[in-house]
Image: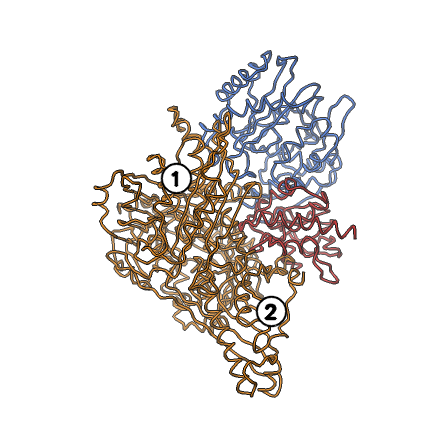
Amino acid sequence: MTPFELVEPASLGEAIALLDPEDAGVRPIAGGTALMLMMKAGVFRPTRLVSLRKLARLNARIAATSDGALTIGAMTPLALVERSPEVARIVPVIPRAMRRLSNIRVRNVATIGGNLAHGDPHMDLPPLLIALNAEVKVVGANGAQAAERMIAVEALFTGYFETVLAKNELIAELRIPPQGRSRAAYLKVTTGSAEDWPALGVAVALESEGSAVKSARVVVSAATEKATRLKGVERLLAGATVDEKMFARAGDAAAEEAECMTDVRGSAAYKRELTRVYVGRALRQALNSDGATR
Amino acid sequence: MTRTISFTLNGEQVAAEIKPHHNLVEVLQREFNLMGARESCGQGMCGCCTVLVNGAAVSGCLYLAAFVDGAEVRTVESLADARTQALSPVQEAFIEAGAFQCGYCTPGFLLMATQLLEAYPDPDEEQIRHYLSGNLCRCAAYPEIIAAVKLAARRRKANSVG
Amino acid sequence: MATSSGQVGTPKDAKVGGAKVGSQIGRSLPRLEGRDKVTGRAEYTHTMRLPGMLYAKIFRSTVAHGRIKSIDTSAAKRVPGVYRIITAEDIRTVIPAPYYGPAFHDQPILAVDKVHFVGEPVAVALAADPHVAEEAAQLIVAEYEELPAVFDEVEAAANNTLVHEELKPAGTFADLKHLKGRKGTNVALDFKLRRGDVDKAFAAAAHVFEHTFHTQKVLHLALEPFASIADWNERGVTIYSGSQGPSFVRTEIARLLGWPENRVRIKVPYLGGGFGAKLYIKMEALATALSMIVRRPVKVALTMEEQFYTITRHPSTFVIKTGVDASGRITARKCEVYWNGGAYADVGPRVTQKSGFTASGPYDIDNVWVDSYALYTNLPPAGALRGFGIPQLVWAYESHTDMIARALKLDPLEFRRKNLLREGRPQATGQIVRDAKLDAVLERVAERLNWGKPLARGNGALRRGRGIAVAIKAVISPTTSVANLTIAADGSTTLYCGTVDMGQGSDTAMAQIAGEVLDVPAESVRIVPRDTDVTPYDMGTLGSRSLFHMGHAVRLAAEEAREKIKAMAREVGEPEGSNIPLPDLFKKKFGMQAGNIVGTGTYKPDYVPPDPATGLTDKVTPFWMCAASGAEVEVDTETGHVRITRLITAVDCGRPVNPKIVETQISGAVLMQLGFTMFEKMHIDAGQVTNASLADYKIPAILDVPQAMENETVDSHLSTGPFGAKGVGETATFCVSPAIANAIEDACGVRLTALPLTPEAVFRALRAQANKPLADDA
């Protein structure tokens, strides 16, 4: 790695001031696991890294509100999310999905904010968070003033490793709304070794009444350039009767809608077939799981 | 751009002159002559560079040394008793079970196995496999590593009872 | 317990008649170096430092074949802290003919005039700070005039696009001499074997089958990447290197420098894995040249990514044709094998020839024709990887054998039994097969698989099946090992041998052999670290040869020492059969604790080179390695995912010297080949490796270990082996791939003929079978 300046501001305002909206060589660093990879590969040569470790407002914290919403501080390491009793109680699908997310050392260091801000389509949490209708609180500069805005995780990603975040904006907090009677599942599909990055990620969350689906959110990732909602599939599912035929129809629609890409993990044609099968499997798993968001 | 960091290393208070782009493994090797954490894949995939920072396992090759300022750092060199040099139950079990061949990845597996047994003193095979799933051994001593963790768990239990 | 903590046993009980410590052979002694490895103290070249050392960072070619028009080092030189930038021009000031290689002197230390593959070293940045060297290397700019390149081995054989203008065999091997100075070809060796008359036999056969198989480019991926440190001065050079063959390195560096061997010293710290990658010259020549230029110690330590541009396993294409008579006997087999050797020959020609001996498989066939070609292409070089070509061959011939049995509606096991090469029969080369337990390994696997009893076939989308495979390898010959052994006046034993313990446990095994002869505990035998100033010649730690060849040399050295002890006892007047403790004997002889007994042993088996026209010889190998594997799989026919539910391997390794270490060698070999079978693959686009990292090139991790993996050694004793032993490092790799492919066909009816057996490959085959082929992407 080539030399750079490392600054560790103590306040959010200071941090945002140290970030430069015009300079691609200046970036914030949280856990740094993903950024270090880019730096070691020489694809990112920073002039300045702004560490977020000393910012109290982004602190590692997980809180549940009385209505069943969760807020998670951006600097919370993934391992804390994985082990949190609140998370396990309210959205158990998250710790289940995290078990196969990268490895323990990465989960100990990588933060929830960094995981989202990186925009890597192979991450396991973004599709799931989109399915759960989560949003992030983003802080940035508005002239001399600090400014905040809320962005749906769904709207965060604009392309391959690209997000709507300005270079001087930071994710401060993740909010997962109350899940009510919704049930969710995430399936990671690998085509190499068991601990490989996913060739396809499928996240679903749906509410049903009796044998009918009330509403559904279906998200694919890894096979596509960014984590993407399959709205056509969702429309197909809304009001549909839950049965094997419906799973198959949803799979077919998903294969049609998802824009899969070819890489070392498989051809686009094959990933479409995986999507066809795994959207059905994810729906089946979600509906067979018991209770809310399980 | 040089800065001084101070931290606890294997129980001792230490300080080092580093630059922001130095990672933890190179600083441990260069400044402290601790060679047990080694860079292999350079991407946090293999676990050869495993170091414990504030009690959590991290990939030392992806960890800026600057970030251990004020932290507590432990390496494989701390597993044996500092005074008597007696090996830990996990180290003993790795030798007895033949849980390594070339030994390059072994420090990482030892630290992870030690962490595993602290979190789950009586792990089943599934827990062992999942906990160690992010460490790679090209000699593929995996069956023996699983056996060693089970053996170490039994030893630890016997020791704590006796 | 005493041994488990690495405590060293005591030699005090050593006596003239032996201390009767019990047999050292057959003991599951934990590895002698265990304590070093679990405390993090084991020293590897990659983490070594010498005072005043400079770090080298390599600038590599971005084109597959091209003439170097210019190299611009000006920006690199301006990086603060850079010591020097080096190109081939600088190398030639110290080594005028900077080409090396075990079979051909074809590989330049840095690219001279031309580059031959993407990733070839072109220039080097030197600095005291490795980060500075790295930054500078990234600022070097080269311009190339691109030339046509060839990547496929079969296309290369047509010789339309040439990788090298002229062939430069090293002169070491008789069978390469005819290639000297040859132009207009990419063929670096053409091995032929001709037995009987295949054409006549095909004409007479009831059935003839022909299939073509492919294997992919894969990597050794030792977790310790290549590293060498050279420290040169006018009197000599010392090289610290993670090398599997320090004797070869010494010879070759001496040749490059025009020095006698005794001025070149190779020291080998622990190796973080080798698997055949760390043989011959890798970073040693570059480190030496750099040290000569700057007159300081220089370290060349690669990153994981750079390993992908250094040495790999040969991709192969194997066209195999078999004639079968009406009774199900194989009457003829024709094998055409194309080995993709990449841009430099390395040891490829030896892989081509030595594996060619057994390309027709472990079967008794009267008419055999083998053509085996080593080919140059514009890819990273290929060498030996745990099997010396055998896993590629077995993949083809055992898939083919299964396909024949299925086509003829014969039981695949029965078909193999009927044709198996039996004890006392001639192998294809003409050598009579002795001490090869082919039948035993096959039968043990069949028994464990419950072959003949019905298998639950699964339901719905999940289909289950099982498969079996059996193989043979002729261990490489002729090779030489030398061992020295000293006994000090206190009775303690020190062993000097050049076999490199890269994790396979050879130090422990050699100590057991010495201990067995001298009747002392193996733990009490000290093995001296590899250092060519001290440890005598050994051809190299490769091809499962060490336990047999070095084992014999150690045995001979210990036996000589034992005879000298007896002679000393006679000389000082001890009665026949005396049991005087050794320290007392030395005192009696020298009047005090003084003196040494030195034993030495040299071993080289008989060998008759194959006839150049027919490839036949009755002494091709000192022993046969035999293996069989069986697999049970579950195929998800909706996605193509294959789950291996059982993986069984039986090997013949003669008498196991250390059963526990043998067990780990078997399971380690099985799991490594499992990766090569199921998913490992270097993806290459126009010569550029596109997945040169552990993020995108996956190797087996703990979750990939089959839930049921069963390994065993069959009862065996090699009559010509040291205490009955054979080598075992590679054996268990042979049959894994075809056993799994055969099981997949058994499960769901599709046959894959190319590795790896990815879910997509299985899925595509299933769709093709259903007449709904999956379209390729545009």
* Numbered mark located on residue C21 in the image: 2
x%, y% of residue A51? 68, 41
- Report whether C311 appears left or right of B20: left
Residue placed at 50% from the left, 78% from the top?
C563
- Report whether C354 appears left or right of C50: left
State the residue in front, C146 or C609. Answer: C609
Q: How is the image coloured?
A: by chain
> Counting residues from the N terminus, which is met first, the one under dot 1 or under dot 2?
2
Q: Secondary structure at mark 2?
A: loop
Query: Mark 1: which amino acid?
Result: Pro
Which shade of the palette goes to chain B?
red
Which shade of the palette goes to chain C?
orange
Report which residue position mark 1 lands on: C412
Q: Chain of mark 1?
A: C
State the residue in front, A152 or C210. Answer: C210
Relative to residue C720, is residue C599 depicted above or below? below
- Report whether C339 appears left or right of B144: left
**Disc 1 residue crowd, few under 14, some 14–19, many 20+, Cα 10 Å:** some
Which shade of the palette goes to chain A?
blue
State the residue in front, C516 or B6. Answer: C516
Relative to residue C61, is residue A88 depicted above or below? above
